[in-house]
Image: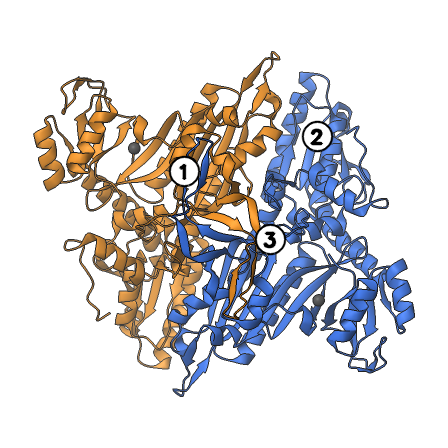
Chain colours: A blue, B orange
Amino acid sequence: MAQKFAKRSEDYSKWYNELVYRADLAEHSDVRGCMVIKPYGYAIWEKMRDILDAKFKETGHSNAYFPLFIPKSYLSKEASHVDGFAKECAVVTHYRLKNAEDGSGVVVDPEAKLEEELIVRPTSETIIWNSYKNWIQSYRDLPILINQWANVVRWEMRTRLFLRTAEFLWQEGHTAHATRQEAIAEAEQMLEVYADFAENYMAMPVVKGLKSPSERFAGADETYCIEAMMQDGKALQAGTSHFLGQNFAKAFDVKFTDKEGKQDFVWATSWGVSTRLMGALIMTHSDDEGLVLPPALAPIQVAIVPIYKSQEDLDAISLKVAELNGKLRVKGISVKFDDDDQKRPGWKFAEYEAKGVPVRVAIGPRDLAEGKAEVARRDTKEKSSVSWDGIEDYIENLLEEIQTSLFERAAKFREENIRKVDSYDEFKKVIEQEGGFILAHWDGTEETEEKVKADTQATIRCIPLEMPKEEGKCMVTGKPSAGRVIFAKAY
Amino acid sequence: MAQKFAKRSEDYSKWYNELVYRADLAEHSDVRGCMVIKPYGYAIWEKMRDILDAKFKETGHSNAYFPLFIPKSYLSKEASHVDGFAKECAVVTHYRLKNAEDGSGVVVDPEAKLEEELIVRPTSETIIWNSYKNWIQSYRDLPILINQWANVVRWEMRTRLFLRTAEFLWQEGHTAHATRQEAIAEAEQMLEVYADFAENYMAMPVVKGLKSPSERFAGADETYCIEAMMQDGKALQAGTSHFLGQNFAKAFDVKFTDKEGKQDFVWATSWGVSTRLMGALIMTHSDDEGLVLPPALAPIQVAIVPIYKSQEDLDAISLKVAELNGKLRVKGISVKFDDDDQKRPGWKFAEYEAKGVPVRVAIGPRDLAEGKAEVARRDTKEKSSVSWDGIEDYIENLLEEIQTSLFERAAKFREENIRKVDSYDEFKKVIEQEGGFILAHWDGTEETEEKVKADTQATIRCIPLEMPKEEGKCMVTGKPSAGRVIFAKAY
Ligand SMILES: [Zn+2]
Ligand SMILES: [Zn+2]
């Protein structure tokens, strides 16, 4: 670890990129915009996926799988959807290669041209509603509550690991309902699921809100979102849940017969989170030494490093550790005992620090003699000498404390960086000098949104759901405002 | 269930296709060759995935994720790989659509043509070894033991649900080793993992073997496989594990420094199973009434159907069932209590039969009064009146018995349909009239393989690993043979 890394305070963006490599989470591939998610990064994503998946199932959803490819014409069926998604995407035009005549390799076979081009899914509303059309006849077929874990592709010119990549992994829920109210309740329920996951597992406080019309999902009547504040004060949209009205049902002609025998179009929602959450997790907690992980998402919660000179010492330590290991496993705590003799303890300490392992236990012959071990927590870097007797309970409590304390630290940071602002001059000054979230009045028009964005790069992150309603005047135009909205620069 | 379905004995292929729909496992999508895996089918696949994933992790593997797209030139780097995989595949040539000038929808933007076409992965050796190149310098970086769960695409003109689809889901393990022996041991270990999974979870007996050179994976030095016999006597290759030698290391220039400081190319394996296993599962156990599932893979192991006329009856039954439910859950048995009052018991019985639920419990007011319930097993359709007292143990044992009995039934069927044949005339007669696996002597040449295939459509399924060695003479040419191989017609 002799290498010098960027500090957060010096260059946040460089710090982020270096951290993703240091912690061995992901790397760029040679394929433009596509990343390789490395085993340690993938193990964190797997934890996220499993926790979310259990929550989706608890709320009545089943998983299914729909095709990767979408016929080009499907994208045009929903008018606003096509504007949002049919642009920067990967287009499959041929289905065969052949040997080049000059022996230089393979070339596309011009005779194997598809009649209709296929788009690699950027999101699956269209292909899924084309199936739902055949699944739904009567109210008895509703609701349909399906989720899909999949890869999607949105061609991006400027990419950043996890935050913006051409291919990414995500889940997309797609539900069909008999009534408008039921669909809205579903969209709101899934927003709550996301907020619960963000706060109680990622230890990342979020604001629940509604997107302004111009920031809605293409094809949605309403987009709910959760917005988190990163350490540099910028906002990151961590999940969205869309009430799609009857838009896709109309586009794909999906009607059902209700209990009274009347026909109506079906109501829809969709909702998703992606590997972008990995970026949010990193930028909420980590520090100059590397990743900091909340225990609930750490693939390794406790790393145990033996300090020894002789094989005898190591044997004695290993015996003691095996006992602890068993006790921790019973509690469902994941442990790694690192007795690799090619690496020095100092190197291991730095390595587990870089990888964000929440608790590190070091134990040497003297500790052993005294019936103690050194326990270090990653978040505050505090070390304690802990009696071996009952150390498993100490560690269990410490993991809970770290989980809570990470959330509180992030919540405090966010509180310190949410500011109410009433004049546009002040807004411009604050967004430039302080960043963070700004609560300001807005007249509800797209023109004002665009002006603010052009002047300051800040956008409306959301119209918060849980805030005392306070009428006022738009900071830009002076026109009436129904309540403050959150402006911020965003990832 | 008034509809008349094809019987296995009349039209096996039609029976299969209808069964996939009846059991609600999957359906064709409007995208050529791509299927929709429906929630019930996906729930079975999830069980398979979770069991296999745990086995991969137990044997030291981690999951990771590599890009969906492969630059066209990568496929040409390994000479035999390109012949096997660079032909029928989905080719991405453009990265943008634009609005058609005549307002008719969207068209491919000719200005957004990729400099190098991207292939949607048919398998990931090339893209992964292009990454491993940067990960491996010394023997300390080895072994690399990585698995990926992903979708892959191989353009197919004639598709069948699960058995042969353009897009399918699979896992692909890709490992890198310092020595030839270690790589071979890995390939053999994963073959054992697959065989264990096939036999002990799918209840599907398999023959472990080696592919003949002409049937090897493109780029492999040796392909191990497991072959299962379907109910129509045809073979299905259920999993493959490849010893790749140094072929991909040479193609991508991946060398490492060994302990003595000497440089050498890295040794490789890859291994995979896919959603094709769903087809194998169906065709091993199911019958004319629908799917038959081994309990180890059944999303619902026990369906409980109340028989009632009054709400009072239902309430009394529900109370009793809730108690049983709790007892079964403690045992890790998944239960569905189907009190849907829109559907009649007979309809439900047929439905759970079609879906292969291993055990069905029916309980009516008289059963309740007598302290009994009717327990039916799906595989043999036997029904028993079982005392309510201890019924949870009865069901637990029954599930185990069904699991064992399905395997035994399939093993017996296979035994009855493996035949030793010594003359080519007899071979042609047996393969035409009886089908099944034929153990015959072969001279080891591709010419003979091709002749047999041309004459009879049968191919060498494998050179079995666990068979007494018996020298002999090739049934076709009379030349010497080192041992019998398995011929069969195959899926
Ligand atoms: Zn928001
Ligand atoms: Zn074989």
Q: Residues within 10 Å of mark 3 (few under 14, many from 20)?
A: many
Tell which residue pokes out farthest to the top in this image: B260
**Residue at left 46%, top 19%?**
B180
**Residue at left 52%, top 45%?**
B68
At label 3, the amino acid type is: Trp
Q: Mark 3 and mark 1 in contact (Cβ < 8 Å)?
A: no
Q: CA distance from mark 2 to mark 3?
A: 44 Å
- Camera-nearest residue between B197 and B177: B177
Tag of residue A155: 3
Q: Badge 1 sits on which subunit?
A: B
What SS does tag 3 mark? loop
Tag of residue A305: 2
Tag of residue B85: 1
At label 2, the amino acid type is: Val
Q: Badge 2 sits on which subunit?
A: A
- In the rendered structure, the answer to whether residue A319 lies left or right of residue B284 reads right
Relative height, residue B147 to residue B356 (above, below): above
